[in-house]
Amino acid sequence: MTWAYVILGLLVLILIHELGHFTVARLVGAKATRFLVGFPPVALSFRRGETEYGIGLIPLGGYVRIVGMNRPLPEDVIVCQDAIEEIDLRRPEGQRDLLGPAAAQLKGAIATDASPAECQIAADRARLALDADQHLLHPKTYAETRKNLERLHDDLDRRAYWRLPVWKRIAIIIAGPGANVLAALVILTIFFWHGVPLQKPTTDVSAVSGTPALTAGLLPGDTITAVNGTNVNGDWKLVSEKVQASNGAPVALTVTRNGTTTTLPAVKPENVDGRWLIGFSFAQKPDGVRTASLPTAAANSAEWSWFVTKESITGLSRIVTTSDGHKQVSSIVGITATSEESVKSGSFLWMMGVISLALAIFNLLPFLPLDGGHIMVALAEKLRRGKPLSRVLIERISIVGIALVLVLFVIGLNNDISRFTGP
């Protein structure tokens, strides 16, 4: 059930992201024809105005269709080619060719950058010609061609995304990450206002990671009762102090395991940044909550959001500037596992707030198909005084961006597997 809460939380954050795009698209006058909770195919929907609202069968957050995300090109009319060839084979002798000339007219309108109305009239003529020859087409060919023509008709609309001023396009794109930032601020405010769960360290071992601890045979779940024969009386600070006082000399831990007290073999601590460490972490137990007034909670939310944002950006920069920076990357697997632990500790809202910020930051990375890439394309067009980048160039940039995203995912997944399976 814990996993269900985590997955639902992640999907809600993605839905909020898409809702941000959709809301601002409507506000700036773009044509948005579909908004789904989930992904197509559609299970249930209704239409209000020009927009279809509904529920998709694939529960992956949300889906928004803003028409004309890519500028139509003359070669896009090739969507009619299969239908034209099929009609030519079956057209009775003497019957006029309708779709061929209509498709050529549509191609010419796009090539000459005709007005939106002229382009859409040409697209309508192509659809009417296709309908007139429907009896000569295989049902699948007809359905696919008509669907493609309808999409092309929409993409030529005067309110299509590619026709909008650059500032409107940037506003639509940045609204997705912006919605996640706003969601993070709200979630973290509620977290601090409702109460921050406090944790108290114990002398129980929660995880073992260092060579000395592994050599000694220390295991998660052990309870440390003495260090070098001195009873620690459940005080984790005393355990730490005794290890530091050893100054690198061998340390023998006495532990209780499954009701049996055992003294483990003495091992030499490792010096890490001036501290002597055996290589384990203390388990913690709940120790009440700390609440705050709503204004204080909002201030804490803003302060921590800024801190998390700075740390996230610094962490991303370390991937390329340091040799071990990639070790901080995590995949959806690690995020989900960490979120599951936060549910158990009462910090689920905190984790959801941090993940919402992470979604915003990741989507603003400046390469396609992420939002940051779309913003860079819009700015490049602005610098070129309205001259758009070629479709071929955008597709090549997208391939590079997808490759980078996949590399980050593989690195994160490898890190997560290493964390789960141990050193």
Image (cartoon, rainbow, N blue to C red):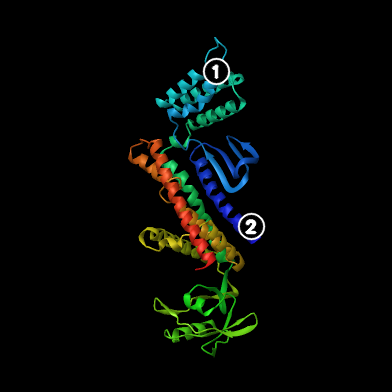
Amino acid type of the residue tagged 2 in the rendering: Ala
Q: Which image quarter holds the N terminus?
A: bottom right
Q: Secondary structure at mark 1?
A: helix
Q: Residue furthest bottom?
A: 230
Q: Which residue is mark 2?
A: 4
Amino acid type of the residue tagged 1 in the rendering: Leu
Tell whether 283 sits left or right of 388. right
Q: Residue sitting at 51 percent across and 53 percent down?
A: 180
Disc number lying in front (2 or 1): 1
The image position of residue 264, as x and y in percent, is 54, 83
Q: Residue sitting at 46 percent across and 85 percent down?
A: 250
Q: Which residue is mark 1?
A: 89
Query: In the image, which disc is placed on residue 106?
Result: none
Q: Residue furthest top?
A: 94
The image position of residue 163, as x and y in percent, is 44, 34
Q: Residue sitting at 63 percent across and 61 percent down?
A: 2
For disc 2, the neighbor class at 10 Å (few under 14, some 14 to 19, many from 20) is few
Q: Residue sitting at 57 percent across and 62 percent down?
A: 337
Question: Looking at the image, is 161 positioned above or below residue 37?
Answer: above
Q: Secondary structure at mark 2?
A: helix
Task: Judge by depth and name the residue closer to the eye, 360 or 230.
Answer: 230
Tell whether 390 sits left or right of 239. left
First reached walking from the N terminus: tag 2 or tag 1? 2
For disc 1, the neighbor class at 10 Å (few under 14, some 14 to 19, many from 20) is few
The image position of residue 15, as x and y in percent, is 56, 49
* Real-space Cα separation, disc 2 to disc 1, in angstroms: 55 Å
The image position of residue 215, as x and y in percent, is 50, 78
